[in-house]
Amino acid sequence: MGLVDVVRAGRKPFKRAYVAVFLWFTGRAIQAAAKVDEQVRREFDSLPDDFTFSLGVLPDGPWMLIGKDKGRVKYLGGNPGGRRIYIRLAMKNIETAFLILSFRESTALATARNRLITEGEVPHALAMIRVMDIVEVYLLPKMIARLAIKRYPSWTPGRKVFGRIGIYTRVLLGI
Amino acid sequence: MDLPDYYEFCCRVKIVAGHNALEKIPVLLADKGSKKPLIITDKGVVGAGLIDIVSRVLQDRLAGTLIADNVPPDSDIRIVHQLAQLYRDSGCDAIVAVGGGSVMDTAKGVNIVVSENASDLMAFSGAGALKRPLKPLIAIPTTAGTGSEVTQVAVIKDHEKHLKMAFLSYFLLPDVSVLDPRMTMTMPPFVTAMTGMDALSHAMEAYYCLQKNPLSDAHALSAVNMIYRYLPIVADNPLDPNGRLAMSVGACLAGIAFSNSMTGIVHNLGHASGSVCGVPHGQAMAILLPYGLEYNMHKCEDTIVRLLLPMAGEAVYHDTVKEQRPQKVVSLIRQLNEDLHKMTDGRHARCFGELKDREQKPTVPREALPRIARAALLDGASMYNPEDTDYDDNLMVLEAAWEGHPLDRSKVKKG
């Protein structure tokens, strides 16, 4: 060893791949939920026309972006492409991201434990957290969703079943 | 003991507390290399004669001290920029903030502008925008409530654009806070009551909300003990110096606690009722605190029960049936509000329906409750509340708090 030894972070390929797939799937699910669920649609209606939200991992990704484009909500992949990011929700490292996205810690608890950095206006961030909570209820079985959110909602069976079918179908078809 | 997997805690404010603590200010300024501080305050503080006490202490030791007393009741960005200009033009080298929450926030805003040599304060809004230490700031609170003397937050309003911007950074923590009972002695009983209840709400919400940790808990429990014991004493006898000192220390402890563990539904609905109807913050806290505990009871009963011991002492704790202890905490807070109502000849309101403005019109008309419930959805304090909150939950709590009836806990949604 020389006088200075550079410490490099491990790449952790499994966790990185899990997080990347999760973000890709969630991004497409938010796009789908904005078409299927009335409450998600209302949340996006209250946001600016060029609103863009990004969720990802520090320091070098992966990231996913959701944006409004001519009134439609779109999953924009991982590259902002010059768009103004209104809300950036950054998990501090890949371990934190894995902890949150494997539902061992809720978003609220992760925020309380300083594992997330939120950049942007608070009302916009709260709207996006509500959207993500709804999407998690659609995507996950109740037993797991209860770990991810503060309170499991009491929706009608119709909303849950038809919404879930609609969102999964749209995610798989990418529409 | 609740031990979270991970937490952060920071309070690097030197606290100088006690009778005649103000006399230490010249030494504290000298420690910081300051020869010409700018005192920032408001006309109420000057009118109460409190600035005279501070300037007498300073005049003996410092040749040039500037006093600016034009801070409005609500912090204002124009005043921040004006005071920053005054600081630069006069060659000041430190800031001494003497006042309540608005003065503290204004002083922190001025400190950002002068330290960063900036032209626009708003460029530093949000979290993490400040990257280096600021100029020396000494905080001298004249209320025992806000805890701003030990918090890392400043809220500055842009009245022209109707914006309220928050600034969050460890660099906003004052270097020194001086707690001297002379500075709170002139507060009338009803202001003492609402600022004291503000401090109690900081301590209690810090203790049961999601970001709680062992260090914030220790501060919160000590704060609850001091505030609950001494608030009725100073509301009844404002000139009690020991009671005043205890309240200042209690509010400071509560400030340290909530600055590190944040707050929940009580502050969430309190901020919203302030922005929609102009309800004074401390008054909103006093009214909403029992409802916050009731709303979250099913999620953190075991935590709430631990508040009983520092409030009521061992005898009451042991004499209360175990199952009834959490509810006893709530009823003691309601009783405290009732006592303060009597001590202030009815000026301390127990419910939103009782609140009146100067023209004796209702401050919170019942039809404003839906707007408050909606406004609360835009406030970040909801994030740290143990139970989720939506529009219907907010409205349910607000309606009970308007009537002054206990919350029907069977109607709180659980999932």
Image: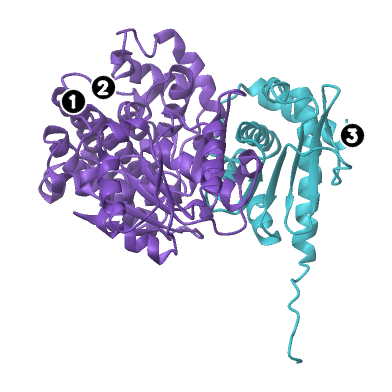
Amino acid under disc 1: Glu
Label 2 environment density (alpha carbons within 10 Å; few <14, some 14–19, many ≥20)? many
Quadrant that contains the N terminus of chain B: bottom left
Residue B350 — which label? Answer: 2
Q: Please tell me whether mark 3 or mark 2 is closer to you in this view.
A: 2
Residue B240 vs residue A84: left or right? left
Residue A173 — which label? Answer: 3
Residue nearest the observer in this picture, B87 or B292: B87
Residue B59 vs residue A53: left or right? left
Q: Chain letter of disc 2? A: B
For the residues labelled 3 and 2, the Cα–Cα distance comes to 57 Å
What residue appears at the point 40 percent right and 66 percent down from the top-left corner?
B31
Mark 2 in CB contact with mark 1 (< 8 angstroms): yes
Residue matched to label 1: B338
Q: Chain letter of disc 3? A: A
Which chain does purple denote in the image?
A: B
Q: Chain letter of disc 1? A: B
